[in-house]
Amino acid sequence: MSSSGERHLTSLPEVHVAADPEAAAQAAATEVLALVRDAVAARGRASVALAGGTTPGLLYRNIATVGRAGAPWDRVHIFFGDERCVPAASPHSNYALARRELLEPLGIPAGSVHRMEAEIRPAAVAAEAYEKRLRAHFAPSEPVFDLVLLGIGADGHTASLFPGDSALDETRRWVVAVRAPAGYEPTERITLALPVINRARAVFFLAAGGSKCAAIEAVLGAEHPVHPMPAGRVRPAGRLTWFLDRAAAGRWR
Ligand code: 6PG
């Protein structure tokens, strides 16, 4: 792992391109379930960090449709890659979407859901609180998620790591407070730091729609030692897989 905590891809990313967002979400759901089953079989439990934004809703619904038989859900711990600094019940909360579309339908035990309490003020304290929760779960090791689910913004941000933000260079703290740029409301957020994401055994991106195409082509099209787009700096030594619809895939279709 380099000094910045970034590992370099030892294998090229897998890119799955489906006809439309629903088909992409179905393909991703199948892989998520297989990965979770394998992780529990191998280590007795699985730790998954959910993505934010709206796209994961399609994925969650596909996973919930399979039902509890899809994976040993009682052995799965759910975390979050980032969260907006809003109450848990806010329509802007990443947790609220997951609870409605995935956690409640699958009856995930409350003790297995590790919500980012991003409503704590100041946000730096919320970030420290989540880091404590990660330490408790992964102790005595550093956090290694079996799967981190991510989305991507039109500017190439992922989780709440935005282009040019000093949070991209964080290598000591595991969770950091950030302010999103104008246009990305709510602006105050907390997010996993890049080295934690890059330690994951697998990272899946799920993206749909033409607005993401330029960013995805930039990220998939060129390897930079330090990519200008945060999504381009997600370089796990483990598995990296993109689930895209044709509109988002562009020349990668
Ligand atoms: C967030 C996300 C963010 C999201 C992208 C894509 O909290 O907003 O973590 O990185 O994944 O902005 O969002 P959409 O799925 O809504 O397009």
Image (cartoon, rainbow, N blue to C red):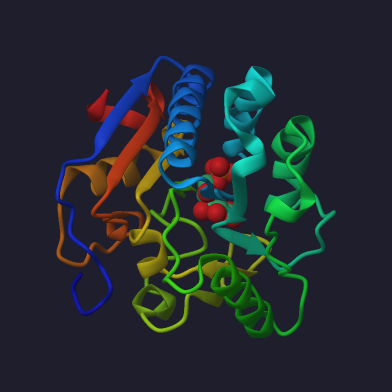
User: Measuring 44% from the left and 47% from the top, which residue is drawn there?
Assistant: 43
**155 lies above or below 251:** below
User: Measuring 70% from the left and 43% from the top, which residue is drawn there?
Assistant: 98
Quarter of image, res 24: top left
Q: Nearer the viewer, residue 40 or 18?
A: 40
| Residue 186 coordinates in the image, percent (x, y) | 68, 63
Image quarter (top left, top right, bottom left or bottom right) of the N terminus = bottom left
| Residue 226 coordinates in the image, percent (x, y) | 21, 67
**14 lies above or below 21:** below
Image side of residue 149 versus residue 215, left or right: right
Image side of residue 47 versus residue 8, left or right: right
| Residue 29 coordinates in the image, percent (x, y) | 51, 26
Quarter of image, res 89: bottom right
Image side of residue 83 versus residue 145, left or right: right
The reply to whether residue 193 is visible in this rendering is yes
User: Measuring 50% from the left and 57% from the top, which residue is drawn there?
Assistant: 159
Image quarter (top left, top right, bottom left or bottom right) of the C terminus = top left
The reply to whether residue 53 is visible in this rendering is no
**95 lies above or below 246:** below
User: Measuring 42% from the left and 71% from the top, which residue is drawn there?
Assistant: 141
| Residue 104 coordinates in the image, percent (x, y) | 79, 37
**196 lies above or below 251:** below
Quarter of image, res 3: bottom left
